[in-house]
Image: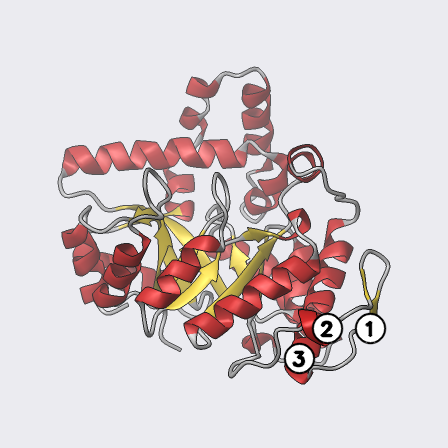
Amino acid sequence: MTLKLDAGLGTEGDYLGRMDTTARAAEDLGFAGLWTSETKHDGFLPLAIAANATEEIDLGTSVAIAFSRSPMATAQTAWDLQSLSGGRFLLGLGTQVKAHVERRFSMPFDRPAARLREYILAVRAIWESFQNEGRLRFEGEFYRHTLMTPFFNPGPIEHPEIPIYIAGVNTKLAYLAGELCDGFHVHPFHSPEYLRQTVKPAIAEGARSAGRDPNGVELATSVFVVSGGDERETTEQRESARTQISFYASTPTYRTVLEAHGWEEVGERLGLLARDKKWREMPSLITDEMLRAFVVEASPEELGPALRERYEGLIDRVGLYLPFRPGEKDDFWRAVLGSKV
């Protein structure tokens, strides 16, 4: 399978006002997909604009926060985007973390893996009711959907099979992806060794439990890259990546990535520095060996082959940990895409 190169949407300034131009530019350059995030802004809304402005590029959320919405709300929005895009929508869901779900969204978070599993089943039951215009009866531990009348049913669409991706770091969610999902979003803080030791086996185990082929679960990720035009720019990017990695590695949630390399002690030291707000001391703990594990470094012209060499057989879709904005770094993007990932 050919590695697909995707773009991630930048959300600064009047990004929604430029969304049609951005989406067309991404499609014209040859990106396979365009993903939105959900931090300061809604993840779905930009894709409605992008769907009208494009014809071929995949459009997905990376990721929409599941527990901030009911399954019905997510199912309706995804259904409309799938119809509007002519079957190009990818529903990417994430759990977020307990503090944000409970304190920012004021929603329940208990047993997130079990809750997300039921959430996915509920969404699919709702879609089946939409497509077949039949009775809705989903009754689980966390969600109950037992009412759907013709007045509220949007009815069938041409492409009712909407792929569902979930995002995760630890094995429970990777297992769930193998059991139920079409794709899995791997966190940017990762390494090929972590993919081989942790992610792929958990997905395979989940797939086997459900009698599924693990190769049917598509893996997508974004990648830290160093690809400067000169030595000064390359050095700046390298140190920026070192800082970003030190932040992620300080968080207990991501400790499993370090475990694949035997670097747990570094994570513990980083966690103590983060606790004491000694941010400037943290990057120095990220060695060059660690940087090579978590970052792809190559010239723009060689970046495509470098990504292919690193991820062949491990990842299906890859984006760079850089937002795509038309008019910025266009020569860089052309060089990367022209190198035939």
Q: Could you say where residue 249 lies in the image, as x and y percent from the top left? A: 52, 36
Whether residue 244 is visible to the viewer of this picture, yes or no, is yes
Residue 135: image quadrant is bottom right
Colour convention? secondary structure
- 19 and 265: which one is in front? 19
Q: Is residue 305 left or right of residue 166?
A: left
Which mark sits nearer the N-terminus, 3 or 2?
2
The answer to the question of whether label 3 and label 1 lie on touching residues, with beta carbons closer than 8 A, is: no
Q: In percent of the image, x 36 and y 48: which residue is there?
A: 16
Residue 280: image quadrant is top left
Query: Which mark, by number, is residue 137?
Result: 1
The answer to the question of whether label 1 and label 2 lie on touching residues, with beta carbons closer than 8 A, is: yes
Residue 340 higher or lower than 262, as above or below: below
Q: Residues within 10 Å of mark 1 (few under 14, many from 20)?
A: some
Q: Identity of the amino acid at label 2?
A: Ala
- The residue singled out by tag 3 in the image is 212
- The residue singled out by tag 2 in the image is 125
Q: In percent of the image, x 55 and y 22: which residue is there?
A: 274
Disc 3 versus disc 2: nearer the observer: 2
Quadrant of the image containing the N terminus: bottom left
Q: Is residue 51 left or right of residue 184?
A: left
Residue 32 higher or lower than 92, as above or below: below
Q: Secondary structure at mark 1?
A: loop
Per the model, the C-alpha gap separating discs 3 and 2 is: 19 Å
Q: Identity of the amino acid at label 1?
A: Arg
Q: Could you say where residue 251 lies in the image, as x and y percent from the top left? A: 58, 34
Q: Identity of the amino acid at label 3?
A: Arg
